[in-house]
Amino acid sequence: MPLPEDLESCRLCSERFVTTHTAHRPKPVVWFRPGAPILVASQAPGLRAHTSGKPFDDPSGVRLRDWMGVGEETFWNKDHVAIVPMGFCFPGYDLKGSDLPPPRLCAATWRDAALAHVGQPQVRLLIGGYAQDWHLGKGRVTDRVRDWRALAPRVFCLPHPSWRNTGWIKRHPWFETDVLPTLRTAIQDALTR
Ligand code: SF4
């Protein structure tokens, strides 16, 4: 199994990325170390994270930190939060400007090793359909988020915090009133243990 140390130099998707609308090169955003009590299992870095090298360095990150009830200092502290996406590189945009999916090859190559490297986090956030399908098998994001009591407080399925899901959040007010307070309590418990 490849070691996470090799991950930063991975260029397996060079040919794939050069054919995207953004025609960029691979640049893995590696943001985890052993022992973090919180795992953010996410989708893939956005363009801003690709540029800065920091995951969730964008409005999605602002929203995610609000959901978690933590500030930047805690969120970007690798001793607190391990961020392990389904694709470690920005996958690029399609012609309509939408994010392309994370390359399947990435999770197949790196995910087991990266998760083993992190260890046994106390709380796992599964963000979006790609991460949820990988960890739990096929299912619908809305059903999983609605069914949050089945896995809380160790696992929380969340929609992607992108502005594209603002309508979803408005249509499902129980997410903010019921799920988020429990999530924030679980995060605080994990951080203070
Ligand atoms: S997305 Fe994953 S597999 Fe592809 S180049 Fe980046 S690190 Fe490597």
Image (cartoon, rainbow, N blue to C red):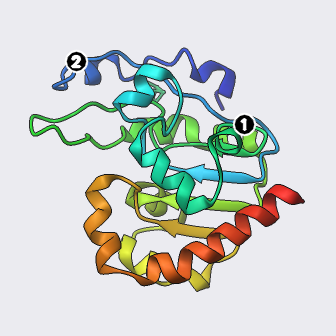
Front residue of this view, candidates 86 and 193:
193
**Residue drawn at the location 41% of the way across and 56% of the way down:** 161
Element assignment for label 2: loop
Residue 28, image x, y percentages: 49, 24
Residue 46, image x, y percentages: 37, 35
Q: Quadrant of ligand 1?
A: top left
Name the residue tied to disc 1: 78
Q: Is residue 189 above or below residue 57?
A: below
Crowding near the residue tagged with mark 2, few <14, some 14–19, many ≥20 C-alpha atoms within 10 Å: some
Q: CA distance from mark 2 to mark 1?
A: 30 Å
What numbered label is drawn on residue 170? none
Residue 171 image-quadrant placement: bottom left
Q: Is 181 positioned to the left or the right of 61 in the image? A: right
- Asked if one can make out residue 78 in the rendered structure from this viewpoint, the answer is yes
Q: Is 25 positioned to the left or the right of 189 in the image? A: left
Name the residue tied to disc 2: 23
**Residue drawn at the location 72% of the way across and 71% of the way down:** 185
Which of disc 1 and disc 2 is earlier in sequence?
Answer: 2
Residue 38, image x, y percentages: 71, 53
Position of the C terminus, as image quadrant, is bottom right
Q: Is 93 positioned to the left or the right of 193 in the image? A: left
Element assignment for label 1: loop
**Residue drawn at the location 54% of the way across and 83% of the way down:** 178
